[in-house]
């Protein structure tokens, strides 16, 4: 039983998500434990997108007719609402296609900052922090999703910088003392995940940021797995840039968010160029609008922004403190049922207070894809593979894992159904439960 929500409250929450009522695999009830990959959408999100297309659809920031005014107002109202959800003003919220693009935006903008004249007029001290060249250093962690690793590898390749990293222990935790050893006066960027999509580890971004800033480095946090599960205030988190994505927090596919400190966004050169982000254009050259427009070339994802704003409304109505408490109860339950099955190995911390959202594990002698297939035959939707975090799996000496991941609509009964289906694995593959 959950203590965060009554049975009636949880029943009403689940009723808001139409897809949870369907059946799969010959009429079995759907047990959706793959919210870490993409969460399901409540009706209010679906209705918000549909309403925009039915009544307000038009190009934004261009036309002078009523529909264009309404569409522009809807986009900017959504920007303000999404910013408020993470404690940021609208002027610091940049829309992207997803969290991956948000991180790439920063990585490419920083490489563009190395071009001659790119930072003309910028405070010299800030410009020095943004210019990355041979011998400079970029620090990441070994638990990163590829989206917060490969862009930094590529930035290092383009600029001649050196990529360095800190690792995690068998408990899935990072010893922060490593940063005292790896940070130097040449460190320009420190990037880390707020919550690991594999280990579920909740990293202390604030403590890392304090160390990084003392070294003069910029801090980029991947919050794709934390914003859906925990109250996140970018003003107190400590990072300079925070990336998250709509589809993991009950919002639409096709929209991500980059938050950045305004002074940093205003100093950075653009990532992509074209319409909507320009101030003046002449054949001899162009100038660019201030943030956030500077980073939103082309037609923005207006309907998706409206839908994501509705998702923020929904989560705030539930209460992010309650969402976090519910997640912790689910994690405790999930850890308990796996501990009762000694032929499984949990990846990451064994204390629910040190993790959120995702519960990855392996089954002795059975490939994770086979585990996933057995669960799927029972209507249990999980994910198997390396979850776009191959180095983390390599560190753990496993090729892949099975991951169950939760959301506000997940129930304890679903975790019990998952455990019962998991018990079929040893019997099918010749092991012993």
Image (cartoon, grey):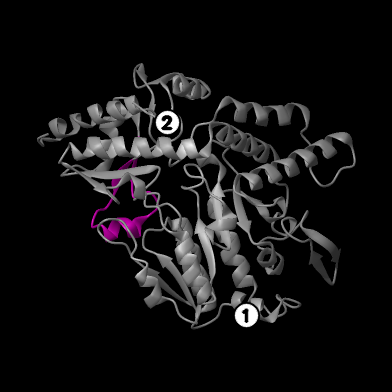
| Left or right placement of residue 39 versus residue 263 in this view | left
Would residue 162 be counted in the magenta stretch? no
Range of the magenta residues?
382-403
Q: Please tell me which residue is depicted at 42% across the width and 52% down the height of the picture.
A: 195
Find residue 128 and name its label: 1
**Pointer 2 residue:** 4
Query: Is tag 2's residue or tag 1's residue first in the polypeptide sequence?
Result: 2
The location of residue 106, given as percent across then percent down, is 59, 63
| Quarter placement of the C terminus | top left
Would residue 398 be counted in the magenta stretch? yes
Q: Please tell me which residue is depicted at 84% across the width and 39% down the height of the picture.
A: 69
**How many badges with numbers are in the image?**
2
The location of residue 384, given as percent across then percent down, is 33, 42
Q: Looking at the image, which is closer to me, 401 or 283?
A: 401
Name of the residue lying farthest toward the front = 3
Q: Please tell me which residue is depicted at 68% across the width and 56% down the height of the picture.
A: 92
Classify mark 1: residues with Cα within 10 Å, few (<14), some (14-19) or many (20+): some
Disc number lying in front (2 or 1): 2
The location of residue 241, given as percent across then percent down, is 58, 60
Name of the residue lying farthest toward the right = 64
Q: How far apart are marks 2 and 1 (CA)?
A: 49 Å
Q: CB of mark 2 within 8 Å of CB of mark 1? A: no
- Which quadrant of the figure has residue 281? bottom right
Q: Please tell me which residue is depicted at 78% across the width and 53% down the height of the picture.
A: 276
- Which quadrant of the figure has residue 368? top left
**Circle 2: element type:** loop
């Amino acid at each position: 039983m959950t203590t965060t929500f009554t049975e009636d409250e949880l029943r009403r929450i689940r009723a808001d998500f139409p897809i949870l009522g369907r059946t799969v695999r010959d009429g079995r009830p759907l047990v959706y434990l793959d919210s870490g990959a993409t969460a399901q959408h409540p009706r209010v999100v679906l209705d918000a997108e549909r309403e925009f297309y039915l009544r307000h659809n038009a190009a934004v920031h261009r036309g002078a007719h009523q529909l264009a005014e309404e569409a522009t107002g809807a986009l900017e109202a959504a920007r303000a609402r999404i910013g408020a959800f993470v404690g940021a003003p609208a002027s610091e919220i940049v829309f992207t296609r997803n969290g991956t693009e948000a991180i790439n935006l920063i990585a490419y903008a920083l490489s563009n900052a190395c071009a001659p004249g790119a930072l003309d007029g910028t405070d010299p001290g800030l410009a020095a922090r943004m210019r990355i060249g041979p011998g400079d250093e970029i620090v990441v962690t070994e638990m990163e999703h590829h989206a917060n690793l490969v862009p930094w590898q590529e930035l290092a390749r383009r600029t001649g910088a050196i990529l360095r990293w800190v690792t995690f222990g068998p408990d899935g935790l990072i010893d922060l003392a490593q940063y005292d050893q790896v940070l130097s006066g040449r460190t320009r960027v420190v990037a880390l995940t707020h919550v690991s999509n594999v280990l579920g580890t909740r990293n202390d971004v604030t403590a890392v940021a304090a160390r990084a800033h003392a070294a003069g480095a910029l801090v980029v946090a991947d919050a794709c797995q934390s914003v859906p599960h925990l109250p996140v205030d970018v003003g107190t988190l400590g990072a300079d840039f925070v990336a998250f994505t709509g589809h993991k927090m009950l919002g639409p596919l096709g929209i991500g968010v980059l938050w950045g400190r305004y002074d940093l966004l205003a100093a950075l050169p653009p990532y992509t160029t074209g319409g909507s982000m320009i101030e003046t254009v002449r054949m001899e050259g162009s100038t660019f609008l201030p943030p956030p427009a500077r980073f939103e070339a082309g037609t923005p994802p207006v309907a998706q922004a409206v839908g994501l704003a509705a998702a923020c409304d929904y989560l705030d109505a539930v209460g992010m403190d309650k969402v976090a408490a519910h997640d912790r109860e689910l994690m405790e339950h999930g850890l308990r049922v796996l501990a009762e099955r000694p032929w499984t190995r949990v990846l990451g911390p064994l204390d629910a207070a040190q993790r959120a959202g995702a519960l990855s594990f392996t089954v002795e002698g059975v490939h994770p894809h086979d585990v996933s297939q057995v669960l799927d035959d029972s209507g249990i939707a999980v994910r198997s593979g390396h979850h776009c975090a191959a180095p983390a799996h390599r560190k753990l000496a496993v090729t892949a894992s099975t991951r169950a991941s939760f959301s506000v609509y997940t129930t304890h009964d679903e975790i019990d159904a998952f455990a019962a289906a998991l018990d079929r694995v040893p019997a099918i593959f010749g092991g012993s439960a």
